[in-house]
Each structure stands twice: as structure tokens, then as C-alpha cells.
Amino acid sequence: MEILDLKKLITFHSNRISREMLSDKPEMRIALMCLEAGQELTPHKAPLRLMMYCVEGKGTFTVGDEEVVADEKTAILCDPMVPHGFKADKGERLVVMAVVTPVD
């Protein structure tokens, strides 16, 4: 069993996105990303299934051609090879937990 206490793992950097790999196993990878207001993870593709879970704050999430504004406790699912990314909205910090699993 592993316990991830996200409250203790959240860290922000003024000059870059804080990224921490919380678990890296073949069946599932979990990363925590903390963004100051205005910071962005530009849309990109990956050959994995993805869940972006908004832990804290508010941001704009991009999946394919769609954008959605999401806040705490919102999960956004993305299929493999679909462009995805997110941005901390103006005046808002954003904490996202990304969970990726391999494609069957």
C-alpha cells in the first residue's frame, strides 16, 4: 500500500511548473503538477489514457479542440493521442494530478 498525502507534496515555483512523479509503475503513472497563475502546460499528445484531476484552484483544460474551465474535484479524461494541456487562470494557482495508464 502507498499513501500519497497531496497536501504535503504541493510546491510552487515562480519561474516554472512544479512537476513531481508520485508513482511510476508499468500499469499506472501518477504525476503532480503545480502551476502559479498564468503558467501553462502546452497541449501535447501521448500514447496513454489520461485522467487530469484538479486538486486545487481553477484552470482552463484543453482536450482536442475543446476547452473547459474546471475547478477543484473535477476529473477530465482523455483518450490516447488526443492533444491535452492546461493553464492556471489569471489570479489562480492550479494543482493537477495526472494519472496515465497504458492502452490495452
Image: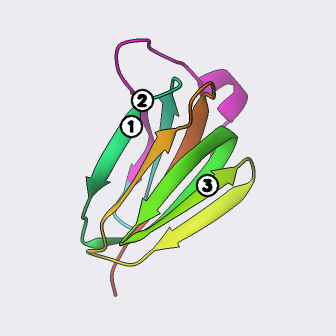
Residue 50 placement (x, y as % from top left): 44, 67
* Residue with the most extreme front position: 90
Q: Which mark is residue 40?
A: 1
Image height of 70 relative to 95, above or below: below
The amino acid type found where label 1 is placed reads Glu
In the rendered structure, the answer to whether residue 81 lies left or right of residue 12 reads left
Alpha carbon of mark 3 to alpha carbon of mark 2: how far?
Answer: 15 Å
Residue visible at 62% across and 24% down in the picture = 91
Residue 102 placement (x, y as % from top left): 34, 74
The amino acid type found where label 2 is placed reads Gln
- Highlighted range, magenta: 1-24
Image height of 64 relative to 90, above or below: below
Q: Is residue 99 visible?
A: no
Q: Is residue 91 visible?
A: yes
Q: Quadrant of the C terminus?
A: bottom left
Determine contact: label 3, label 2, CB under 8 Å. Answer: no
For disc 3, the neighbor class at 10 Å (few under 14, some 14 to 19, many from 20) is some
Determine contact: label 1, label 3, CB under 8 Å. Answer: no
Residue visible at 57% across and 66% down in the picture = 76
What residue sits right under mark 2 in the picture?
A: 39
What residue sits right under mark 3 in the picture?
A: 69
Residue 39 placement (x, y as % from top left): 42, 29
Image height of 58 relative to 103, above or below: above
Is tag 1's residue or tag 3's residue first in the polypeptide sequence? 1
Alpha carbon of mark 1 to alpha carbon of mark 3: how far?
Answer: 14 Å
* Image quadrant assignment for residue 10: top right
Alpha carbon of mark 2 to alpha carbon of mark 1: how far?
Answer: 4 Å
